[in-house]
């Protein structure tokens, strides 16, 4: 299917120009409308692409090389400023085009609300879908300042869509009392922990279709300061890479990496970390040539 409504300025390192031959598609979703503190995530996809060239294409941990993988960078979805519903619709439609072509969508946010239209879309193709959510924040509010659609409510909406029993949340260390009560009662909720519970969950989810949503603020602000709502007390990059490697043995059908905010990232360490996560994700979830 022809992808429409995209603009392209730069590409992720090593990506092919051949959409049809690619098994994985990188897609920028620069939604930046509902953040609660510091905006600027709309600039993340282009920054992540820009710094990606600083990395090697070879992963010594995985012993795999991007040169052996065919992945396409579709550029960024053009989102109409201020029109939330239309923006979510465009994200869903673009992901639908990619998935109906049998390709793995790897989205670069944007804010965390981009996950909602992606899950809505993937659910049509994968009725057994479960969502693995790595984040500092529970994102389980029912509304944020009377708004039901927000980066602070996104996992609540996802839980309504696919059922709380199909939502697995790791690393959470921030939220309201109500969110923590709701999470403990409704989702598979692992506050503050990642690798130990994820190891068990991965074993349980063999064969299920998994969507991975990775909010960069799950990492400690020491490693990822470039984000809108930094939360002290987070994990290290090694733990997140290890989480990806665990998921490499599962049936992951799509992924997003959200909430990178380049304006608060003067050393570019957050974008660089994001780019390396994208590289490892391609090597974990892509298909070798
Ligand atoms: Mn989030
Ligand atoms: Mn967060």
Image (cartoon, helix red, strand yellow):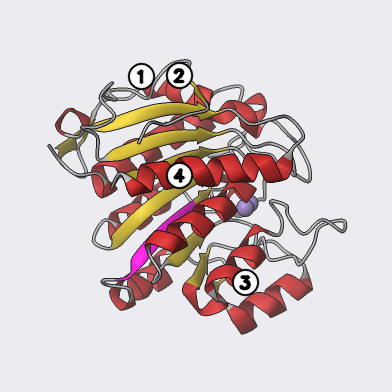
Mark 1 residue crowding within 10 angstroms, few (<14) / some (14–19) / many (20+): some
Q: Earlier in the sequence, mark 3 or mark 1?
A: 1
**Image-based side of 18 in relation to 132, left or right:** left
**Image-based side of 158 in relation to 206, left or right:** right
Image coordinates for residue 42, horizontal then vertical, percent: 63, 30
Image coordinates for residue 222, horizontal then vertical, percent: 58, 40
Q: Let me know if residue 154 is in the magenta part.
A: no
Q: Which residue is tagged 1? A: 53
Mark 4 residue crowding within 10 angstroms, few (<14) / some (14–19) / many (20+): many
Q: Which of marks 4 and 3 is nearer the N terminus?
A: 4
Q: Look at the image and tell me in which quarter the N terminus lies.
A: top left
Relative to 193, residue 186 above or below? below
Residue for point 61% across, 36% down: 225
Relative to 138, residue 188 above or below? below
Q: Which of marks 1 and 4 is nearer the N terminus?
A: 1
Q: Which residue is tagged 3? A: 160
In the rendered structure, which segment of residues is drawn in magenta?
A: 208-213
Q: Nearer the viewer, mark 3 or mark 2?
A: 3
């Amino acid at each position: 299917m022809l992808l429409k409504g995209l603009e392209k300025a730069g590409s992720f390192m090593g990506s092919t120009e051949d959409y049809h031959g690619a098994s994985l598609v990188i897609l920028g979703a620069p939604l930046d409308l509902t953040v609660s503190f510091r905006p600027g995530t709309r600039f993340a996809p282009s920054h992540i692409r820009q710094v990606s060239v600083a990395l090697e294409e070879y992963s010594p941990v995985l012993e795999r090389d991007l040169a052996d993988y065919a992945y396409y960078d579709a550029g960024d979805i053009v989102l109409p400023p201020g029109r939330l519903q239309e923006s979510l619709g465009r994200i869903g439609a673009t992901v639908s085009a990619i998935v109906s072509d049998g390709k793995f969508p790897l989205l670069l946010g944007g804010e965390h609300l981009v996950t909602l239209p992606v899950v809505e879309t993937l659910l049509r193709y994968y009725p057994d879908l479960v969502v693995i959510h790595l984040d500092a924040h529970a994102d389980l509010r029912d509304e944020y300042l009377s708004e039901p659609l927000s980066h602070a409510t996104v996992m609540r909406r996802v839980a309504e869509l696919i059922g709380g029993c199909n939502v697995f949340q790791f690393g959470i260390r921030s939220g309201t009392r109500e969110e923590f009560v709701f999470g403990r009662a409704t989702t598979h909720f692992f506050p503050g922990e990642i690798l130990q519970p994820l190891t068990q969950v991965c074993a349980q989810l063999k064969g299920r279709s998994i969507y991975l949503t990775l909010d960069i603020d799950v990492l400690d602000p020491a490693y990822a300061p470039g984000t809108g709502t930094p939360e002290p007390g987070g994990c290290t990059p090694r733990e997140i890479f290890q989480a990806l490697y665990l998921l490499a043995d599962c049936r992951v059908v799509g992924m997003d990496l959200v909430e990178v905010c380049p304006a608060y990232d003067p050393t570019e360490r957050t974008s660089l970390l994001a780019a390396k996560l994208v590289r490892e994700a391609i090597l974990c979830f892509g298909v070798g040539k």
